[in-house]
Every structure is written in C-alpha cells, then in structure tokens.
Image (cartoon, helix red, strand yellow):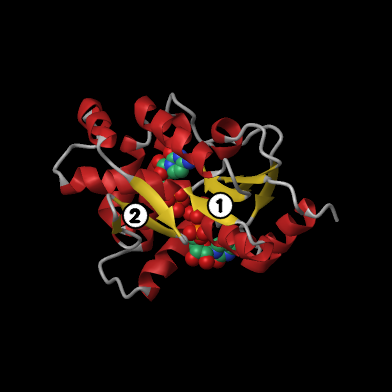
Amino acid sequence: KNEKFVIAIDGPAGAGKSTIAKEISEKLSIEYIDTGAMYRALTLKAINNNIDPNNEKAIINLMNYTEIDFKNNHIFLDGKNVDKLIRENIVNNNVSYVAKIKEVREGMVKLQQKLAETKSVIMDGRDIGTVVFPKADYKFFLTASVEERAKRRYLELVNKGEKNITYDRIKNEIESRDQIDSTREVSPLRKSPDAYSIDTTSKTISQCVEEIISIIEGR
Ligand code: CDP
Ligand code: CDP
C-alpha cells in the first residue's frame, strides 16, 4: 500500500488492543499510537502533583502546561520517559476520571489527529473509530468476556512478580473502569456501527492479527 491510511482499534480493557495493534504496526511498517497512554500520562502527572482526578478545573489547568509526546513507541511526559510509571495500579484506578473530562478529551483528540496527519497509523483506544477518526479506512472493535480479560491482566501481574493481587480485585477494577468509560457523557466506549467486531476470548493473538490483516488486505 502506498497511500496514507488509518486503522482504528477500540474496545474495553484487556481485549488485546495494544498487543494486537503493535504486531500489526510491525507487519505493515506503520506507526502504532496508544491513546490510552496519553490519558494515563496526564493522570500520572495529576497524581504526582497531588491533584484530585475529579477536580476538573485543576486537571484542565494542568493539561495546559503538560507536554505529551511519542518517540519510537515510547511515551514522554514533559520530556521524561514514563512507559513504566503509567502502568502502575494507582494510574489504572484513576485514569477513567481524568478521561471523562470534556476539555481533556478535546485536547487529546486534537493531538491524536495531528499525529496521523503525515503518516499511516494504527491507533487504539475507546473512541478512535467513533470520534478521533470517524472516517478511518479500517475500524475494528475487540471484545472478550470480562472473566477472560481479568485473567489476562492478572497473569500479566503475576508474571511481573506482583504479590498483593487477587483475580477478584483485578476483575472488579476492570469492571469499574469499563463502567465509567461506557457511561460517560463525552465519547463513551462504544462500537462504531461500521466497525468489524472480533471476540478475542478464545482466540490467540496471532489468530486475531491474521484476521485483521486478511481484512485489510481484502482477502
Ligand atoms: O490498556 P487498558 O485497556 O487497560 O487501558 P488503556 O487503553 O491504557 O486506557 C486507559 C484508560 O484511558 C481507559 O480506561 C479510558 O478511561 C481512557 N481512554 C479513553 O478514554 N479514550 C481512549 N481513546 C483511550 C483511553
Ligand atoms: O490493550 P488492551 O487492554 O485491549 O489489551 P492488551 O494489553 O493488548 O492485552 C492484555 C493481555 O491479554 C496481554 O497480556 C495479551 O498478551 C493477552 N492476550 C491474549 O492472551 N490473547 C489474546 N487474544 C489477546 C491478548
């Protein structure tokens, strides 16, 4: 493919979006943009500055002097690499409050659209096919049962060596984040009517990647 194109991937936490999008970006030699990382970075900054994620005014003000950037798949917050810090549990449990603020979403969406101005991208998030790129060339909506998604996240943490976690807690946290993300007023998590749905519950990562590539290549 020579022309510039956009692939949008949306879905709830643990559906497989980032793992699958990353693999596709490598196969197609296009850039991968993780929009969740952007909301996470602003949330991290709020926490570091003792700002309550529910204090909308303070968060909006904070955003206005915050710089979020990607370089070779790494995320930089005010020039500092925060790949690891944005995955901390305290960020997981606060990000959805920051992400439901209208002005925050407007700022992030502008930045996301700018990142795709000059190049082909695969972008994952919650509102990519509905709001960020309603005219994306390809749209996918990934789902999986909440039990499977919680199991995946739990295994990730166990493999990282975390001790103080239980499957039930992870499941509760995922359910509560899904609830906030799906019911918020501004660009809630939902499938764009023209998106292609994939239930990844009992599929391997490579099966999902193959299914998406075959649709993009029109096989
Ligand atoms: O990887 P995981 O599914 O756990 O989450 P993420 O994609 O990193 O997104 C973290 C949070 O950011 C989500 O729970 C949403 O609250 C928010 N988000 C959003 O509102 N819109 C996006 N396009 C991406 C993420
Ligand atoms: O980005 P999102 O929150 O949608 O999910 P992810 O972080 O890409 O995937 C969550 C976990 O599920 C990762 O550890 C993946 O390796 C795993 N996964 C899986 O086991 N099987 C799939 N079909 C998709 C993802």
Give residue 16's position: percent from left, percent from top. Answer: 55, 57
Q: Residue at x 23, y 46 (%)?
A: 45
Q: Report the disc number at residue 125.
A: none
Give residue 166's position: percent from left, percent from top. Answer: 33, 63
Compared to residue 204, the image places residue 99 above or below, namely above
Q: Nearer the viewer, mark 1 or mark 2?
A: 2
Task: Please tell me in which quarter of the rendered image ligand 1 is found.
Answer: top left
Q: Which residue is mark 2?
A: 76
Tell me which amino acid carries mark 2.
Phe
Mark 2 Cα-neighbour bin, 10 Å: few <14, some 14–19, many ≥20: some
Q: Residue at x 45, y 57 (%)?
A: 150
Q: Residue furthest right?
A: 219
Q: Which residue is more in the foreground, 163 or 111? A: 111
Mark 1 in CB contact with mark 2 (< 8 angstroms): no
**Position of residue 18 in the picture relative to residue 59 (left or right):** right
Q: Residue furthest front?
A: 118
Q: Which residue is mark 1?
A: 145
Tell me which amino acid carries mark 1.
Ser
Compared to residue 10, the image places residue 144 above or below, namely below
Q: Which residue is more in the foreground, 50 or 112? A: 112
Q: Residue at x 54, y 48 (%)?
A: 124
Give residue 72's position: percent from left, percent from top. Answer: 47, 61
The number of numbered badges drawn on the structure is: 2
* Callout 2: CB less than 8 Å from ligand 1: no
Say which label, 1 or 2, has the lower sequence index.
2
Q: Determine the secondary structure under disc 1.
A: loop
Asked if residue 206 can be seen in this view, the reply is yes
Compared to residue 42, the image places residue 64 above or below, namely above
